[in-house]
Amino acid sequence: MHFQFEVAQPAGGGAQPASGPPADATDLLRQLLEVQREHLALTRAVHDPAARWRTVLARWQNDFPGLPDACKHVLPLLERTYIDLIAELTEHLRNQTDALANEFALAEFLDRYGMRLGQLVTVLSVVGPIAEMASQQQT
């Protein structure tokens, strides 16, 4: 098969330049830098895990005035419990080489450790940022 393409030159003299003087490159770079700084500030605000909790606690500060300090107080206990559970889990797996050998053993293992471990992680992820805010308020 043979194909033949014919391309004609476009009519006119090409793209017309924008009317008015060209923008100053330094001014454009300054504007670009300003936009990037704004973008960075917004990104930091979005990815700040404590920002959400600061807003919630500010709204309920009168009803729960001691909550950040209470979270700061119980956080080490929760962390210790979490680490103890992981230590127990690893010791269990180390002592029983066939602990995950079949579906029944895996289900028993997950029933024993999975739910508690997952729930403790959730509790830590809520209490941790609030406790951190209490530390930041004291400094």
Image: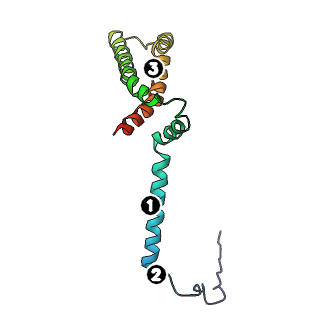
Q: Secondary structure at mark 1?
A: helix
- Estimate the spatial distance between the alpha carbons at disc 3 and disc 2, rounded to whole Å: 59 Å
Left or right, 72 with reference to 102: left
Number of the front mark, 1 or 3: 1
Q: Position of residue 89 (x, y in %)?
A: 38, 15
Q: Quadrant of residue 15?
A: bottom right
Looking at the picture, does residue 92 appear above or below residue 25? above
Q: Type of residue at label 2?
A: Asp
Residue situated in front as seen by the camera: 61 or 38: 61
Left or right, 91 with reference to 7: left
- Estimate the spatial distance between the alpha carbons at disc 1 and disc 3, rounded to whole Å: 40 Å
Residue that appears at 45% across and 76% down = 27
In this figure, which residue is indicated by the disc labeled 1? 37
Residue that appears at 56% across and 38% down = 59
Left or right, 60 with reference to 92: right
Q: Position of residue 95 (x, y in %)?
A: 33, 9
In this figure, which residue is indicated by the disc labeled 2? 24
Looking at the picture, does residue 61 appear above or below residue 73? below
Quadrant (top left/top right/bottom left/bottom right) for the C terminus = top left
Looking at the picture, does residue 29 appear above or below residue 114? below
Q: Secondary structure at mark 2?
A: loop
In this figure, which residue is indicated by the disc labeled 3? 117
